[in-house]
Image (spheres, rainbow, N blue to C red):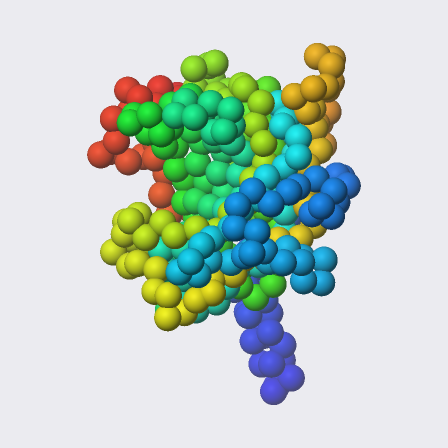
Amino acid sequence: MAFFLSLLLILMSSSANAAYWPPSPGYYPSSRFRSMSFYEGFRNLWGPEHQRMDNNALAIWLDRNSGSGFKSVRPFRSGYFGASIKLQRGYTAGVITAFYLSNNEAHPGYHDEVDIEFLGTTFGKPYTLQTNVYIRGSGDGRIIGREMKFHLWFDPTQGFHHYAILWSPKDIIFFVDDVPIRRYPRKSDATFPLRPMWVYGSIWDASSWATEDGKYKADYRYQPFVGSYTDFKATGCTAYAPRWCRPVSASPFPSGGLSSRQRMAMSWVHSHALVYDYCRDQKRDHSLTPECWG
């Protein structure tokens, strides 16, 4: 009797854990693209004294003196861009650890951007993963963010997890450990980034908004705040590639899109991990985000 009771408890525990873990997407794009070392594809952008290589991982950190950032050597017009990232434990309120695409330096005040941002947190509360898409104009006084925020189904401070952006002429897909968490389709040229972008990573102080809309600020008693990056991937059509360069796919289909299993996994994430969707925010002026209309 004791044996069967123990077996039942194990099965119940396994079922409970499965309920809080997304189903397999059935396809693993991170395994399809070659990894590179940091120096093969990236360079320091700012805060060089706040970067170091540690066991093949790049550590960047923020203290009261400075943060740090890096940038890809080449710009791209489409591709798959990923990195395995480990975040700092403890009090990290006000701190942003980011991996993103942007052309801000080429088009200051009128740029495009595709973000994966980890919003720092206070003791006992989870990190928020924020995805965002800007199209021509963030920084010019009419910032139109397209935020979707998630609480992950694992602790991102316990080890490295792979985060990626697939940018194709048809859509933008965000991945966490190969699970698609968001698809942003190209519904019009006006609502989709089309100009070449570089790949960036950074850590910086965003106390004015990062944690609970700025309620909690960066507390430098807990410095340095460290983000670690490894397993870099940046594969696709560079800005200098011939026009016939074929965009890469992050699905079983060469034409792109998502398989039924990938859509099922993404649906699970939206049901269990999504905590904010700009299209569902009734306080937003959706005349500025026409892609929300359908």
Q: Name the foreground residue: 246 vs 138.
A: 138
- The image quadrant that residue 245 belongs to is top right
Q: Residue at x 47, y 62 (%)?
A: 225
Q: Name the foreground residue: 168 vs 63.
A: 63
Q: Could you tell whether 170 is left or right of 293 in the image?
A: right
Q: Taking the image as drawn, is residue 217 in sight? A: yes
Q: Could you tell whether 247 is left or right of 133 in the image?
A: right
Considering only vertical position in the picture, is 22 above or below 281? below
Q: What is the residue that sits farthest to the left in this orientation?
A: 283
- Quadrant in the picture for the C terminus: top left
Q: Could you tell whether 261 is left or right of 137 in the image?
A: right
Q: Residue at x 43, y 15 (%)?
A: 190
Considering only vertical position in the picture, is 286 above or below 178? above
In the rendered image, residue 172, in percent from the top left (x then y), is placed at 55, 29
In the rendered image, residue 214, in percent from the top left (x then y), is placed at 27, 52
- Quadrant in the picture for the N terminus: bottom right
Q: Residue at x 56, y 76 (%)?
A: 9
Q: Name the foreground residue: 187 vs 238.
A: 238
Q: Residue at x 69, y 47 (%)?
A: 38
In the rendered image, residue 115, in percent from the top left (x then y), is placed at 48, 38
- The image quadrant that residue 289 belongs to is top left
Q: Taking the image as drawn, is residue 292 in sight? A: no
